[in-house]
Amino acid sequence: MVKKIVDLIKSKFLWVNILVAIFSVVILVSVVLFALKIYTNHGEAIKVPNLVGLYENEAEEAIKHTGLTFEIIDSVYTRDAKPGIIVEQTPNQGLSVKDGRVVYLTINAKQKRAITIPNLINVSQRQATYTLTSLGFNIGNVEIIPSEYTDLVLDIKYNGVSLKEGDKVPDGATLSLSVGRSDSVYNGEMVIVPSLIGLSINEAEKIIANNNLVVGYIGFDNPQPSTDKEKLSYKIYRQMPPVTEQVVPGKRVDLWLSKDPQKLQQSNKKDDDFF
């Protein structure tokens, strides 16, 4: 048995096969390493260009000869950046990457975000100004109008249109305020309250404004109107202050509206009895 093992070790056939096997393994490893080098572009790298501050078409032009591609993955809103401009990229500028790598981009929203107007009516001018500027608005014209209360915001307008709580306005918009001043500014001038009984809310608001007064509380009887058009079918049956009372300019006029013919008839009768 020992003799057979010794003869096998001395056999040329054995050593030839061992050498062939070793040579085959070396060749195989070399081929695999060479293939991996080609596949991974070993030793070759591309520096990522700076795409921040460019528009999408400009980024496409800047990257098309680099061997890289890009993909827009997100949109954010940055007030101080131009709409549609690239504000962030991954990988960052200057990093070395492989050919074909995707550069992920975040762009600034192409439209300004809309901000909801809070309820600032009857809030002090200072507080309203602070709140609106904190939300991102600018304050433009401040109109002073007669009021029984001084320094309270009576109206907020955007492009000449009055705003109400819940309205949405573009970020950075310039708003104007109407701020009340007491009757002391107007040398004791008084206003006679007009009759608003039987009118719609739109008709009443115009008359109140023309008489240097301010719309106060507005109450609709049940069922409550669900649209502006439906509100027009409700008529005023009660007002406070009452008709012909003398009040200071800027006095608030409270209104109650209904579709009940009986309430409207009773209100008209009271006006007739008064005169």
Image (spheres, helix red, strand yellow):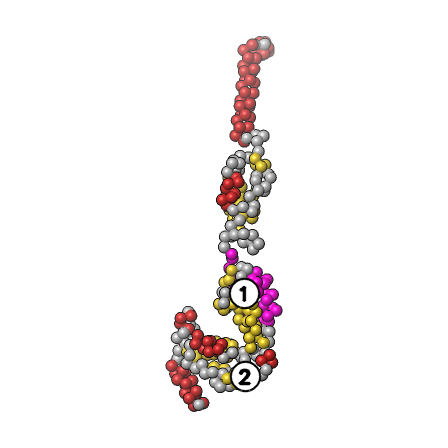
Q: Residues within 10 Å of mark 1 (few under 14, many from 20)?
A: many
Q: Which residue is mark 1?
A: 175
Q: Residues within 10 Å of mark 2 (few under 14, many from 20)?
A: some
Q: Is residue 181 above or below residue 94?
A: below
Q: CA distance from mark 2 to mark 1?
A: 30 Å
**Visible residue check, residue 166:** no
69 or 194, which lies in front? 194
Of the image marks 2 and 1, the number of the one nearer the N terminus:
1
Describe residue 78's horizontal placement relative to residue 224 as left or right: right
The quarter in which the N terminus is drawn is: top right
Q: Kindly identify the amino acid type of the residue bearing the numbered disc 2.
A: Met
Q: Where is residue 218 shown, x and y percent of the image?
A: 48, 76
- Residue occupying image coordinates x 43% and y 79%: 236
The quarter in which the C terminus is drawn is: bottom left
- Residue occupying image coordinates x 56% and y 67%: 141
Looking at the image, which residue sits at the far front? 187
- The disc placed on residue 79 is none
Q: Kindly identify the amino acid type of the residue bearing the numbered disc 1.
A: Leu
Looking at the image, which residue sits at the far left? 261
186 or 219, which lies in front? 186
Q: Where is residue 206 shown, x and y percent of the image?
A: 46, 76
Magenta residue span: 112-140
**Visible residue check, residue 87:** yes
Q: Where is residue 62 shown, x and y percent of the image?
A: 53, 40
| Image label count | 2
Q: Is residue 115 above or below residue 204?
A: above
Q: Which residue is mark 2?
A: 190
- Residue occupying image coordinates x 39% and y 84%: 265
Describe residue 229's horizontal placement relative to residue 120 as left or right: left
52 or 117, which lies in front? 52
229 or 7, which lies in front? 229
Question: Which element type, helix, strand or loop, lies under badge 2?
Answer: loop
